[in-house]
Structure formats: C-alpha cells, structure tokens
Amino acid sequence: MAKFKQPYVLCPLIGQRTLLGVANDEDNDCVIATLGKNMIVRYKLQNQKQIGSWATKDKLTSPVIYDPVGGRYVGVFAHSQLRLWSESEERLEAVKKHKFQTPIHCVLAGIDAEGPVVVFQSGLATPLAAALEARKNAPAAALLKPGEAIQDCRLVVHEGIKQVAILAKTPKGRAWCYTVPVSEDWASHRFELARDDAPDARLAGHAFASDGTCRLFSLWSDGRLFVQPAVTGEAKEALAVLTAVSTANPVSMLPLSASQLALYGADPSEEGAVLVVFNVRFALVQCQQHLKLFSNPPLLWGCGQHLLMAVGSNLLVVPCQLEPERLAAVLGSHRSLGPSVPPGDVELVTELREASWGPAPVPASPALAPAPPDLARRLQQLEATGCPQASMAGQLLPELLAAGDEAGARWCLLHLGDVPEAALVGVLEHCLGRGEQRDDDALLAAALGARFSEAELRAELRRLPLDLALGLVRALLASPGHATRWLAPLLDAHYQGLLLARDPRVLAALDAVRRFVSDQLAQVTCMRSLLPLIEAVRSGKQITQNQRIDSLYSIKRITLC
C-alpha cells in the first residue's frame, strides 16, 4: 500500500510559469531544480539544503539532467544547443556549445545507468553520444505531422527495447501517441488517443508506465480512467471512475509502481488541490493529501520515494512510502455506483457469491485446531457481517485479553492471517506488563511470529513505554529467530528515547543488542566460508586438507642403508 508523510517546502519559486522541471541528481537524495531559464539549483532532500547552483545568461529551454555514464550535467539552450559540464564548473558561458540544425525538445535521463536520450521537436530520438556525432548532418525527416507539438515524452522499455513514448497535440486539441525506438533497427508507431463512446470527452491527464511492456493510462473529463498498450494502440480497457480528483481541470499523473498511480489536480470541491495514490489493480484510492492551493497547470515529478510539485510560489515535497499490498485495505472499501450507471461503464460489485469448484466441499485442514466454542460463535457473527480478518483481529484480541482468555488470543494470532499492528502491539503490552516473564510464553511467541508491515509497526511501537520496550528487547534476544525481524523497527521507534536516556538498564540492553549483532555477523561470516566446501561436496570433488607446517622447525625422516 502507500502512505504519505508530512510534506515540506523545498524552496521558493521564481515563478511557476518559469519553472522548467525537476530531475534526479547523482545521489538518490538530491535533485536538480531548473527554477527558471537562467537558474539551476541542486538540493538535498534530507535537510532541504542547497548544495550547488549555476546561473547563465543564455536561456534554458528544458530541465537540466544528470548523465551518470559521463558524470556530467546536460542542458538544452535556445532549443538548438547542448552543453555538458561537470559539478566543479562555475561559469556555464565558458562551457563548449554543441549546436544542432534540428530543434531540440529536451534530453531524457537514461534508464539503468545508460546514457541520456535527445528528443527533437520533430519526434525523433537519438542517444546523446550519437546525437553529438551527427549534429552537423542534414536533418532527418520529421516524424510528427505538421501542426503537432510534443506535450510530454518519457523514456520507457517495451519488451526489452528502449523507446521514447510521446504525447503530441494539435491546436484543435486532438491527441496522438507515438512510440519511437531509440535504435534505428525498429519502426515507430502512432495512433490517435480518442473516445469513440464519448467524442466530446476531453483528455484530462495521462501517464506512461513501463514494467516490461509500455502502457498508457488516460484520464478523461468525465472521470473515467482507461489503460491501453502504448505501442500497438489496441482497444482501451476501462479501469475505474475517479471522483477523488476533479477532472474539470488538468490532472498530472505519475506511475509509482506497476499498479499504483500518483494523481495531482484540483480538489473535487474546487477548494485547493489534492494529491492521491490510486491502485489500478483494485480500483481504489490508497492515500490522499489535501493542499490549500491549486496551481494550473499542475506540475508533478517523482524522485525516489519523494513526490515534488509546484504549489503556489513554492516547490513542495511529499515523501511517499510504498508498502506491499494488503487485502484488508481492499475489503469493504467499495460501494456500488447504483442503478443510474449507464451500461458499459465501470461498476464496482460488492456482492459475494460462494462457488464450489469440486464435486464435494474441501475438508478443513487437520493442522488447524478448532476455535473454542465461545470464540467460534463470535467469529461466525463477524463473518456474517462481511467483516475481514483484519477487523476481526482488531475487535477480538482486545476483548479476549480484557477477559483473560490468553488461549483464545493465541488462537487468533495463529489462525487469523492478517492482524493489525495496533492489535499486535496491544498483545505485547499485555504479555510484557504482567510482571512475570516465562520462558515458555506461548502468547508472546505467537505475537512475535505474526506478519506485519514494518512502517506501520514502527508507528505503533512508539506508544510502548520505555520499560516495556526494554523488556521486549530482552525477550527478543532470548528468541533469535524473531529478533532479526523485530529489533530494527523497535529501535527505530524508540531511537530518541534510547539516545537521550542515561539509565544503566538502557545501556545494558543496547550492549546486549550489540553483542547479539556481532554474534550474528560472525555466524554469517562462518557460513560464508563454508560455501566453497558445500559446493565441492555437491559437485563430488575430492576435498584436500591443507597440512599446516610450523615455520619454526620441521622434522624429516631419513632412511639409512
């Protein structure tokens, strides 16, 4: 799933209209902000500090990017010049100018440590090294039709072939999608992006996603979200009807993963803006962040685990943490659109029909122990209401612990596969707060063996008192199998308290953790040294033992005749 953290302002803007864009820098925690046509600033996201900048008299026409292959920065000036410079360069006017005969649209950063790609206004795309060599040659035939202009372009990989996906528009608003291979060995493709079922619908937003194959997500003014192959342009597949963001205004879209899209646009209430993460697999909004101001057009960039956008006169950063998808967040989150939905639209069905796929029902696994009678009746009541397992565990565990039924609580931990982190921490508080520590504490062992999300567990562990946290550390060190999973989020949750505490118990616990980690590393080193021996035994090779000879003296037997 996805979760937004507290947003913060990275820097003020010279003006939103003059902001050219943001790109990744050499370090993952740094970005290059082209704030204007004459200003380039490098920022570190961790502390929001400026680490470098350049000013130029010549006008930039696209965002500056970093080339990891050549270890240099690349900028486009006046649509006709390329300049490449290093971090130590102070004056960009002294940098060599590479002039081109064909107007340049932008330079895209490479994928997987490959070189950048130059995209021309004609629709052609060439690697940077090849473009520099052929810049004086006669311009090739244009790929875009007369009147079409590039609105957006992304470097993608489709079935192992590196291509540039381009969205071009005409003055009348017609949109065309191009896929241009970077290599000349492959042909380009072109198709119109339109709605046959709604000719008057306007394209509100789009995004190119590349996860083995290139897909085009399109959001329209009636709120409908579609996906289709960006190369072949086959029939669109309807995904959902979005109501979390207003489609009366432009919407900026950015793929975060194979199934998650970030959307930044106007709030449906027309008051401010909203940033949402939409799961296209389950057709639901996973998280959203409301903003006071909406800037038109909306500008959104992604740099690692951070989303950057222009909000008013500032460049805003919203940290975004992606977590594995959990079924509990999907169940019970949909509702039917009602009978007024026209045929052919996206409809979310909430009714569940149970089907039997065999001639006889599959018997329950004998490994699962039956629930106690009282607990079984309570489970049946919750199942009848359609309650998911996460909600069941969240309701049952506090009730069972309050009633002193540790056996029932242990049964829930072992048999309910999705236990909320808050309920899990509640069980730990119960076990650690009893005042007695047993070596065979079955309830504590079941709680430590449960599955959890580290980000959510870290937030819940912060409410544990420091005394109970130290008790949990001792319990974990006595159970090395669970210590490797729990110690990191536990120490992160109480990092400040442990750092400032001067209690001898805290120092003793930290020293025990240090010894535990050292022992684990020593075991890993020992096992790593056994790998060659195991491989030799597996392959059937003869193992020779090296005879150790003392260098101080040696004994040699001589046979006399």
Image (cartoon, grey):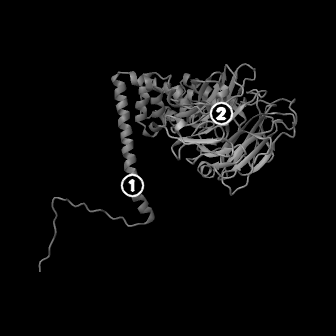
Q: Secondary structure at mark 2?
A: helix
Q: Quadrant of the C terminus?
A: bottom left
Q: Are marks 2 and 1 in contact (CB under 8 Å)?
A: no
Residue 192 x, y percent position in the rendering:
81, 44
Q: Which mark is residue 328?
A: 2
| Residue neighbourhood size for the residue with mark 2, other residues' Cα within 10 Å, grouped as few (<14), some (14–19), many (≥20) | some
In this rendered view, identify the residue nearer to me: 412 or 224. Answer: 224
Which of discs 2 and 1 lies nearer the camera? The answer is: 1
Name above or below for residue 540 compared with residue 320: below
Furthest-left residue in view? 561
In this rendered view, identify the residue nearer to me: 74 or 203. Answer: 74
- Where is mark 1, residue-wise? 530
| Circle count | 2
Residue 41 x, y percent position in the rendering:
54, 30
Residue type indicated by callout 2: Ala
In the rendered structure, the answer to whether residue 327 lies left or right of residue 220 reads: left
